[in-house]
């Protein structure tokens, strides 16, 4: 199984019809050089998997005619995504044939000027390889080269980007994940790792709480399972400071004050205790520290306190406590939004304890579900290459020389802080810190201080705009791969459906090409293999255990359809927890050792500073996935510009009306947005979704501070980011 601590790992359909009215297949075919072919030529179908960083990791069928991708649909053989895609998935033809794609290797002179020139692959590789060798000579190691990869493409062969770096020597690595680390640590302290029930098992629940999770946008294929549970009589409760699309589908929506979920869970726990709805047998047999926590509840928690802390009326806390504890089984899904706070991990620990006290852990239809990496049992051959002999690195805890780690969540600061040797060159793949990292001004300053920047991408996003050389990346229809999900249990093969567009290459091909060039310039300077077809590489990612768990003898069988990893439907149903004590650790010595409370007790939330009284939340958009999709023409047609969602009462205080331009600012920076008055957000919370709009400088992260969340270091190397503890003031312009 893959260990998450190993490296920085993970770490709707309406608008398509809107777009379809504006863009026809005829327009689409005009973009393709091969489109002269007759219409009646044979349509071939291929199996693909959407490789984006998303719960759903959808099974796709691509329809190809005369070498052209005509349509992308859901794969009916995928038991979780069930033949459907999200709105983004249906736009893939627009991505593949987007006129904005980076077509060739290009250089920008000077960096940031927009003055791009097409160069050959050979010139690109020659320039990059010479720069690497030059830095190595000047500094005696490859440590001045810093690598930052995250989640642009989670395909297993895309770990070749990591392999590129390990094969040239010891480098500086951005370690951690901006995504979900606080919650991972919480579940690691409590259960030993993160491990959710099969989401298809959701249909068996009698009560479902979606806690800071917006599945209608971020995991749409779970919605049918949640709906099925409702049809079977389950009640759906959504807890979120924003009345989301998901909340609109719930039986009960609870608008909680941000970052106070722990107080709500503690209030519920106290009421459950007072009514003796506790599953004492389960909790005492399976956990350590349970009675100690019960004492804490008795001595420190009251319903009045929980109500005043969370803004949730006492009667509602009592109602959901009673229903959650007495509906058997009851399930909770803890989203990644709610852990992006300074006490986010701690709040997840408290919610975990609520699941344990009611005996809902290890049960079908139950669980405190967050995510899983149980199905990721690949060999990771594309990323595992050792440094050339004689490479110099940083001496690690094991006494051996190795890479230098810096914090992915304080990237700008950490890059600039490196001395002996300083960081001089950046290599970015599947990663857009210019759009996605907090404190964009600091990121820009850091990029400007570099000697050389290479990025590998498909679009001229903010990071590419700050690069010297960009290498064009294929889309997943143009290469082979295999993908797993961090939520459902399915694994699917991604077949090459069309030839790479223009001169684009996959991260794997780039790794091999760079190795060829480096070794030509200086023999032995790169250990990465220089040959092998993508299918050969793919075959090497499978092993006997993985094949057995999928019921296959050869990976090629996946071409007949995705397979589900054989695991019980309920996580932890065997009761074999992976903590040091082998039990659920309500009292966690490990947490205590790391300077955190040993018990799942209340930790105060971050308060707004006087100068910046309004919380700006920047969660994930419906029509984009971070900096992907929203830049495509169909998405721009459906959602042409970003907006600031603001409650009418707050708007009135600032004299803001619908459509007014509003400057959103703090000491870090500002963005100007059109106001949209809505009662879906709380009175002191404004909302603007993180996304990249084509040819626009909109970026919420100009105002977002790199404030760490409380957890993440234990399992992922660094703490996460408290994206939603971000405070601003407003001004009508
Ligand atoms: N304000 C705010 N900021 C946030 C968040 C938030 O909630 N609020 N969420 C955070 C979270 S949860 C995450 S996960 C991060 C995501 O941060 P990133 O992982 O940086 O985000 P993406 O935009 O998905 O992908 C980065 C780039 O990968 C490129 N890419 C796609 N496929 C390939 C490929 O095959 N090869 C190469 N080389 N490149 C490819 C894409 O074109 C894109 O430009 O953002 C974080 N940032
Ligand atoms: N369409 C789309 N799908 C995506 C993504 C995308 O960008 N777009 N990103 C993918 C990635 S990388 C990730 S990490 C996941 C994230 O998907 P989710 O787990 O759904 O997380 P978010 O969308 O960040 O936030 C979910 C909700 O948490 C709420 N929230 C914020 N703070 C609090 C709080 O203190 N308490 C409570 N109760 N709720 C709070 C937000 O208001 C938001 O509605 O989605 C994945 N899927
Ligand atoms: Mo994420």
Image (cartoon, grey):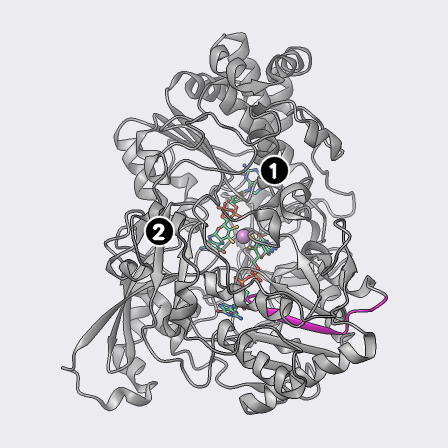
Image point (38%, 51%), residue name = 544
Q: Position of residue 126 (x, y in %)?
A: 63, 88
Is residue 653 a member of the stretch shown in magenta? no
State which mark lies toward you, 2 or 1: 2
Label 1 Cα crowd, 10 Å radius (few <14 / some 14-19 / many 20+): many
Q: Does residue 538 appear in this view?
A: yes
Could you say which disc has been placed on residue 10 in the image? none
Q: Is residue 219 left or right of residue 416?
A: left
Q: Does residue 476 appear in this view?
A: no
Give the structural element (helix, strand or loop) at label 1. loop
Image point (35%, 80%), residue name = 499
Callout 1: CB less than 8 Å from ligand 2: yes
Q: Is residue 113 left or right of residue 516?
A: right
**From which residue to which does the magenta span run?**
420-430
Q: Position of residue 582 (x, y in %)?
A: 56, 26
- How many numbered discs? 2
Q: Is residue 13 above or below residue 235?
A: below
| Quadrant in the rendering for residue 184 | top right
Q: Is residue 384 left or right of residue 305?
A: left
The residue lying toward the viewer, choosing from 646 and 540, is 540
Q: Earlier in the sequence, mark 2 or mark 1?
A: 1
Measure how far apart labels 2 and 1 are at the Cα level: 44 Å
Could you say which disc has been placed on residue 258 in the image? 1
Q: Badge 2 is on which residue?
A: 547
């Amino acid at each position: 199984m893959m260990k998450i601590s190993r490296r920085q790992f993970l770490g709707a359909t309406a608008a398509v019809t809107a777009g379809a009215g504006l863009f026809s297949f005829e327009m689409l075919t005009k973009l393709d050089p091969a489109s002269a072919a007759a219409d009646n030529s044979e349509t071939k179908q291929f199996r693909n998997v959407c490789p984006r960083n998303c719960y759903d990791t959808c099974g796709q069928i691509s329809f190809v005619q005369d070498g052209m991708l005509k349509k992308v649909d859901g794969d009916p053989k995928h038991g979780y995504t069930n033949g459907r895609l999200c709105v983004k998935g249906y736009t893939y033809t627009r991505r593949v044939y987007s006129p904005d794609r980076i077509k060739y290797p290009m250089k920008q002179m000077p960096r940031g000027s927009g003055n791009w020139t097409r160069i050959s692959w050979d010139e690109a590789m020659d320039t990059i390889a010479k720069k690497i060798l030059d830095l190595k000579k000047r500094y005696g190691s490859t440590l001045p080269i810093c690598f930052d990869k995250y989640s642009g493409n989670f395909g297993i062969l895309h770990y070749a980007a990591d392999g590129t770096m390990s094969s040239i020597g010891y480098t500086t690595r951005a370690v951690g994940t901006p995504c979900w680390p606080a919650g991972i640590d919480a579940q690691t302290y409590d259960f030993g790792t993160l491990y959710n029930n099969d989401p298809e098992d959701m249909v068996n629940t009698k009560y479902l709480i979606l806690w800071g999770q917006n599945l209608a946008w971020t995991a749409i294929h779970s919605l049918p399972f949640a709906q099925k549970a409702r049809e079977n009589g389950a009640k759906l409760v959504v807890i979120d400071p924003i009345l989301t699309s998901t909340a609109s589908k719930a039986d009960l929506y609870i608008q909680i004050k941000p970052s106070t979920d722990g107080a709500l869970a503690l209030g519920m726990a106290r009421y459950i205790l007072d009514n003796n709805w506790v599953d004492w047998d389960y909790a005492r047999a399976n956990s350590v520290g349970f009675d100690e926590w019960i004492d804490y509840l008795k001595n420190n928690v009251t319903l009045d306190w929980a109500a005043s802390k969370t803004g949730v009326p006492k009667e509602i806390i009592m109602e959901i406590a009673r229903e959650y504890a007495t509906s058997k089984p009851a399930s909770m899904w803890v989203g990644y939004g709610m852990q992006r706070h300074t006490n986010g991990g701690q709040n997840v620990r408290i919610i975990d304890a609520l699941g344990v006290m009611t005996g809902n852990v290890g049960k079908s239809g139950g669980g405190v579900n967050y995510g899983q990496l149980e199905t990721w049992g690949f060999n990771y051959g594309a990323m595992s290459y050792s440094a050339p002999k004689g490479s110099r690195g940083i001496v690690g805890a094991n006494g051996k020389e190795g890479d230098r780690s810096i914090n992915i969540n304080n990237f700008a600061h950490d890059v600039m802080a490196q001395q002996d040797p300083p960081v001089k060159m950046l290599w970015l793949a599947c990663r857009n810190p210019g759009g996605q990292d907090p404190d964009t001004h600091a990121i820009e300053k850091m990029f400007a201080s570099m000697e050389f920047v290479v990025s590998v991408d498909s679009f001229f996003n903010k990071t590419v705009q700050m690069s010297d050389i960009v290498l064009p990346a294929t889309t997943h229809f143009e290469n082979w791969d295999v993908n797993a999900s961090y939520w459902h249990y399915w694994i699917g093969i991604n077949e090459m459906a069309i030839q790479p567009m223009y001169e684009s290459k996959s991260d794997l091909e780039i790794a091999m090409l760079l190795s060829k060039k480096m070794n030509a310039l200086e023999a032995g300077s790169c250990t990465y293999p220089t040959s092998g077809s993508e299918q050969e590489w793919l075959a090497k990612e499978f092993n006997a255990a993985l094949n057995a768990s999928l019921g296959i003898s050869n990976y090629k069988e996946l071409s007949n359809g995705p397979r589900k990893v054989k695991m019980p439907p309920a996580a932890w149903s065997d009761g074999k927890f992976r903590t040091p004590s082998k039990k659920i650790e309500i009292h966690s010595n490990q947490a205590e050792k790391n300077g955190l409370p040993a018990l799942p007790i209340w930790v105060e939330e971050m308060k707004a500073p006087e100068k910046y009284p309004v919380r700006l939340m920047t969660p994930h958009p419906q029509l984009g996935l971070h900096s992907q999709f929203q830049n495509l023409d169909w998405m721009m047609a459906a959602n042409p510009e970003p907006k600031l969602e603001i409650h009418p009462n707050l708007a009135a205080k600032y004299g803001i009306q619908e459509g007014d331009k509003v400057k959103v600012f703090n000491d870090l920076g500002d963005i100007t947005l059109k106001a949209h008055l809505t009662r879906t957000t709380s009175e002191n919370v404004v909302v603007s979704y993180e996304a990249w709009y084509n040819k626009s400088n909109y970026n919420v992260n100009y105002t977002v501070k790199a404030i760490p969340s409380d957890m993440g270091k234990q399992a992922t190397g660094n703490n996460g980011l408290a994206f939603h503890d971000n405070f601003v003031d407003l001004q009508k312009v």
